[in-house]
Image: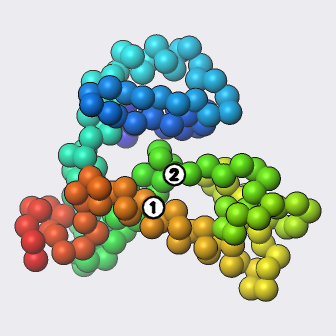
Amino acid sequence: MNGAEKLIDRLVEVGAKIEATNGRLVVRAGARPVPAELVRLLREAKAEVLATLSPSWWRRQFAVRTIDHELGGARPHDDAARLAWGELECRWHRLYGERIPEWQCAGCGEPIGGRAALSMGDGNRAHLDDASGLECVIAYGKRWRGTATAGLRAMDLSASGEDAVTGDRR
């Protein structure tokens, strides 16, 4: 992980959202303000952070992670590409994913109230006490992965049908 990635992760940890728009960095604070030191570091590393948020960076990460899973994990290409895609979905969601208010179920949108709920790694919560016990968790997972996939595809990435190393169509 490079310095820009670590800086972006620190911003996400304080609840901030960051995006690159027309060569500019746009940072939106979450519930907590972004510490002044973090803002200073962001300004100093602006070019590196912009490069890290670019579509070419995401495509390169997909290729590198696919190769790593193929060689390091001795997996077939398709399996390696699926693992790499899942990692990028999680990364995209961490950076850009929706944050639901703590009182609201991320799966069904209803208030959590006094019902049992699972706290997700992204800060969202979902009911646990429905008929199957996990319907809200599963619904939320499908929704955020779908949103992440759409975000990655908007950057011209593809989970299948393209060779992760060369970019050639199969």
Residue at (45, 61) in percent of width and height: 147
Q: In which quarter of the image is the C terminus?
A: bottom left
Compared to 37, does 84 lie above or below? below
Residue that label 1 marks: 147
Q: In which quarter of the image is the N terminus?
A: top left
x and y percent of residue 115 in the render?
Answer: 88, 67
Answer yes or no: is residue 158 visible: yes
Residue 8 quadrant: top left
Kind of residue at disc 2: Gly
In the displayed orientation, state which residue is furthest to the bottom. 131
Question: Could you say which is closer to the camera, residue 60 or residue 18?
Answer: 18
The residue under the point 33% across, 72% down is 82
Quarter-wise, where is residue 126 in the image? Answer: bottom right
| Rendered residue at 82%/76% (across/down) | 129
Residue 153, x across and y down, in percent: 29, 60
Residue located beneath label 2 in the image = 97
Neighbor class of circle 2 (other Cα within 10 Å; few <14, some 14-19, many 20+) is: some
Do we see residue 7 in this rendering? no
Type of colouring: rainbow
Q: Which amino acid does label 1 sit on?
A: Thr
Q: Quadrant of residue 25?
A: top left
| Helix, strand or loop for disc 2 | loop
Q: Which of 29 and 11 is in front in this view?
A: 29
In primary-sequence order, the first of circles 1 and 2 is 2
Q: What is the distance, in whole Å, between disc 1 and disc 2 at their CAs? A: 8 Å
Q: Do the residues labelled 1 and 2 touch (CB within 8 Å)?
A: yes
Q: Which residue is found at the position 42% from the left and 29% from the top? A: 26
Q: Where is residue 139 drawn, in percent x and y?
A: 61, 73
Image height check: is 15 above or below 69?
Answer: above
